[in-house]
Amino acid sequence: MKTMVLNIIERFGLFRVMRYGLVGICAASAHAGMAFLAHRQFHLDPTISNFAGFLSGAVISYLGSYYFTFKSTEGHGRSLPRFALVWLIGIAINIGLFKTLLTAFNVPFGLNVFIAIVVTPIAQYLMLRFWAFKDSVD
C-alpha cells in the first residue's frame, strides 16, 4: 500500500506541488515582512513599501522555483525571462479575475480574494511547470 501511494505521489508530481507551496509561503512571508519593515521602520510610502515587498517575494519565488521546486538544470538566461512573464501573467489573471468577479458577478470581497488567491497560483504553477521550467528534471 505504501509503495502504491508513493508511486501515485511521484507520478502526479505531488512532491513538486508541495515544494511549490513551500516556496510560495516563503515568498509571501518575505513580501509581507519586507513591506512591513520598509513602511514601519524606514517610513517609506505604503505603495513603495508594498512594491519592495513584492520584489523580495519575487526574488525568493524565482530562486525557490529554480533551485528547489523544479530543480532546473538550465541557465538563468532562459528561465528568468520566462519566470518574469509568468509572474506578469499571474498579476493580470489576479487583477482581471478579481475585477470581473466583482463587477460582473458582484462576488463579495472576501470570497473574491479567496478565489483570486487560489486560482492565480494554480495558473502560475501550470505555466511554470509546462513552459518556464518544462525541461527541468525532477
Image: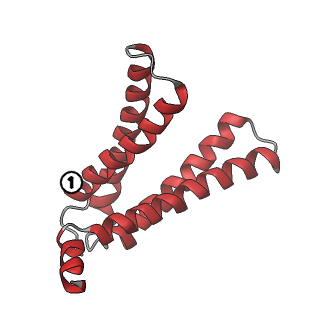
Q: Please indicate whether residue 43 sits to the left or right of residue 24 in the image.
A: right
Q: Quadrant of residue 18?
A: bottom left
Task: Tell me if I can see residue 62 in this picture.
Answer: yes
Residue at 24% over, 73% down:
9
Q: Does 61 sit above or below residue 53?
A: below
The amino acid type, in three-letter code, at marker 1 is Trp
Q: Can you say which quadrant of the picture contains the N terminus?
A: bottom left
Q: Please indicate whether residue 26 sits to the left or right of residue 6 in the image.
A: right
Q: Which one is nearer the viewer's eye here, 57 or 10?
A: 10
Task: Locate residue 118, reporting x and y percent.
Answer: 40, 44
Please state the total of marks drawn on the protein image: 1
Residue at 28% over, 68% down:
14
Q: Can you say which quadrant of the picture contains the C terminus?
A: bottom left
Q: Does 79 sit above or below residue 51?
A: below
Q: Please indicate whether residue 128 sits to the left or right of residue 99 in the image.
A: left
Task: Tell me if I can see residue 137 in this picture.
Answer: no
Residue at 39% over, 16% down:
105
Residue at 23% over, 77% down:
5
Task: Locate residue 108, reporting x and y percent.
Answer: 51, 23
Task: Locate residue 53, reporting x and y percent.
Answer: 61, 49
Q: Does 90 sit above or below residue 33?
A: above
Q: Quadrant of residue 62?
A: bottom left
Q: How is the image coloured?
A: secondary structure
Mark 1 lies on residue: 131
Task: Locate residue 21, reporting x and y percent.
Answer: 42, 61
